[in-house]
Amino acid sequence: MSSFIQTLNDAWQRTNSLLCVGLDPEPSKFPGALAGRPDAIFEFCRTIVDATAPYASSFKPQIAYFAAHRAEDQLEQLIAHIHDQHPGLPVILDAKRGDIGSTAEQYAREAFERYRADAVTVNPYMGFDSIQPYLEHAGKGVIVLCRTSNPGGSDLQFLETGGRPLYQVVAQLAAEKWNASGELSLVVGATFPKEIEVVRGIVGDMPLLIPGIGAQGGDVQATVNAGRTANGTGMLINSSRAIIYAGKGDDFAAAAAQAALDTRERINAFR
């Protein structure tokens, strides 16, 4: 069984893409042809996945968009579809879990056994014992929030501890103490390219999941310059809404494919 990190490295090379397509399905934004269908969330996401897969190296479904509509079964279907039809493209379950060890064990089973995700996002606020249960699933990726793209992230992540901001402490812990499985990655937002550069300096070639280049307005050139590794990879650059809602009519799949292609080419121009 390939590990998350190995699968990701292979996908970067094979697809010539650092693009991660985020799947945040909101039925009120779906085209009319899907209106009222009980499987609308699955069908919308499946169509987006099939259209954008040629230009992506990973997919990131956000669990809240499924759970809020009682569509967890459609999320299971979707991840199974990606594995079956687009093998080798890793799936990151964006859940941002963070709880005590015994609860984390259940969240890990949910992500890796029920949904069959290749990786899951976690919140490090409760420390290592809240992350450890995820590491016990061999070959699965654990992506730790470090410097998030939202404006309020600075409320805590910039607090000084030992003379440096907390997000840098998280980066160092992830790189040096927490990465027992060798499958850790970090979330660093594209809205903060200077911090991406700092984190890259702390963690070496550890992969970085970088949201924020689409609807949140992060600068692609600054992001790539700050975050790329020596071989021009090392990043899962995520775009969600700017791709999946690029078109509002029945041609939404073609519009998403074009947006994904354009985004991949913009990223590659600076690699």
Image: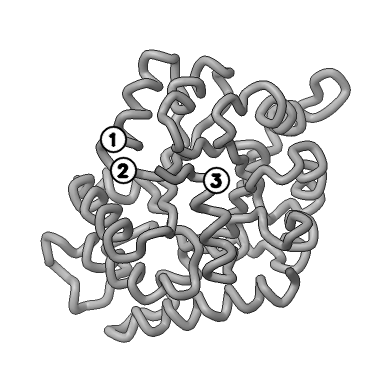
Q: Position of residue 194 (x, y in %)?
A: 81, 50
Q: Indicate the quadrant where residue 168 lies.
A: top right
Q: Residues within 10 Å of mark 3 (few under 14, many from 20)?
A: many
Q: Is residue 263 above or below residue 94?
A: below
The reply to whether callout 1 and callout 2 are in contact (CB within 8 Å) is: yes
**Kind of residue indicated by mark 1:** Glu
Q: Is residue 21 visible?
A: yes
Q: Is residue 6 above or below residue 219?
A: above
Q: Residues within 10 Å of mark 1 (few under 14, many from 20)?
A: few
The reply to whether callout 3 and callout 1 are in contact (CB within 8 Å) is: no
The residue under label 1 is 113
Q: What whole-number distance in Å separates the C-alpha atoms at marks 2 and 3? A: 16 Å
**Kind of residue indicated by mark 2:** Arg
Which residue is at the front of the view, 117 or 239? 117
Q: Residue at x 53, y 68 (%)?
A: 14
In primary-sequence order, the first of circles 3 and 1 is 3
Q: Secondary structure at mark 2?
A: loop
Q: Is residue 77 left or right of residue 245?
A: left
In primary-sequence order, the first of circles 2 and 3 is 3
Q: Residue at x 37, y 13 (%)?
A: 102
Quadrant of the image containing the N terminus = top left
Q: Residues within 10 Å of mark 2 (few under 14, many from 20)?
A: some
**Kind of residue indicated by mark 3:** Ile
Q: Is residue 164 left or right of residue 30?
A: right
Quadrant of the image containing the C terminus = bottom right
The residue under label 2 is 116
The residue under label 3 is 5
Q: Secondary structure at mark 1?
A: helix
